[in-house]
Amino acid sequence: MRMPLVAGNWKMNTTLNEAIALVKKMRPGLDQIEGVEKVICPPFISLAPIKELLKGSSIKLGAQNMYFEEKGAYTGEISPLMLAELCQFVIVGHSERRHYFKETGEIIEKKVKAALKFGLKPILCIGETLEENEAGKTEEVLAKQLSSAGINYAGGLVLAYEPVWAIGTGRAASSRQANETIAFIRQFVSKQSGKETAQGVRILYGGSVTADNIAEFINQPEIDGALVGGASIKADEFISIVKQASDIKRVR
Ligand code: PEP
């Protein structure tokens, strides 16, 4: 049984004070929900204070990005060594990083490996653009994004299928479409790393998930949870998303 996971990607939102206020608002509701792994990914500067705020909570922390080197002359970067003291998860390869910051497959592969080396669970995002989707190239694109040699799927890595055209657009994929694509991803992992490993890897859907559509996604057999952007900085909505995921698929 794969433990469902719902992660909130706060992106470049919330000042420190706002982040603290948001966590205080979310914590009581989220702490009551069982059988689902709950992760929030605030901006870097809020990780340390939020870690303190979350003492004794079942909510886990994730970063939104990291560099792949351990330390050194990389002005402005944050390393996996630094993050390992603060959080358990790190989002890697988000389409906004691929697009705005020109992160290549090679960089992303290094980040995934560095995260695993330092005991962080990468949430590796993959997904096709609208043009690729319309050209019928979704599987080809996903296979390319996944085929970076040497990714260890057995090490706690989480995958997030996030069609780029669905992120922040209010236009979510259909749950059937997402389920089929995630089944393809699992099959691909199975070919690379064996059936048993593939059955253990959690694969999330991300892209305009809300409290109104989460149930459709989580009801699909291949979908193990969600990576939530916009709706994750609205306390009541995020709690509702996690609660519905728990009602439908919690692991006891
Ligand atoms: C995301 O940032 O990963 C995301 C899926 O955003 P949104 O839920 O806002 O589409």
Image: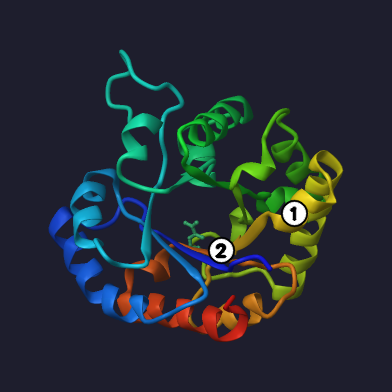
Mark nearer the N terminus (2 vs 1): 1
Quarter holding the N terminus is: bottom right
Disc 2 under 8 Å from ligand 1? The reply is yes
Look at the numbered disc 2 and give the secondary structure of its residue: loop
For the point 78% across and 42% down, the residue is 143
Quarter holding the C terminus is: bottom right
What percent of the width, then of the height, locates residue 41? 37, 54
Amino acid type assigned to the residue bearing label 1 in the image: Asn
Q: Which mark is residue 133?
A: 1
Structural crowding at the residue carrying mark 1, measured as other residues with C-alpha within 10 Å and reported as few (<14), some (14–19) or many (≥20): some
Q: Name the quadrant containing residue 147.
A: top right
For the point 65% across and 58% down, the residue is 203
For the point 26% across and 49% down, the residue is 47
Residue 42 lies left or right of residue 204; in this view the side is left
For the point 64% across and 67% down, the residue is 224
Amino acid type assigned to the residue bearing label 2 in the image: Gly
Q: Nearer the viewer, residue 154 or 105?
A: 154
Whether residue 133 is visible, yes or no, is yes
Instruction: Mark 2 vs mark 1: give the one in front.
Output: 2
Q: Which colour scheme is used?
A: rainbow
Q: Residue 200 carries which label?
A: none
Above or below — where is 79 with respect to 231?
Answer: above
Q: How far apart are marks 2 and 1 (CA)?
A: 14 Å
Residue receiving disc 2: 207
Residue 130 lies left or right of residue 42; in this view the side is right
The residue positioned farthest toward the top in the image shown:
73
What percent of the width, then of the height, locates residue 189? 78, 46
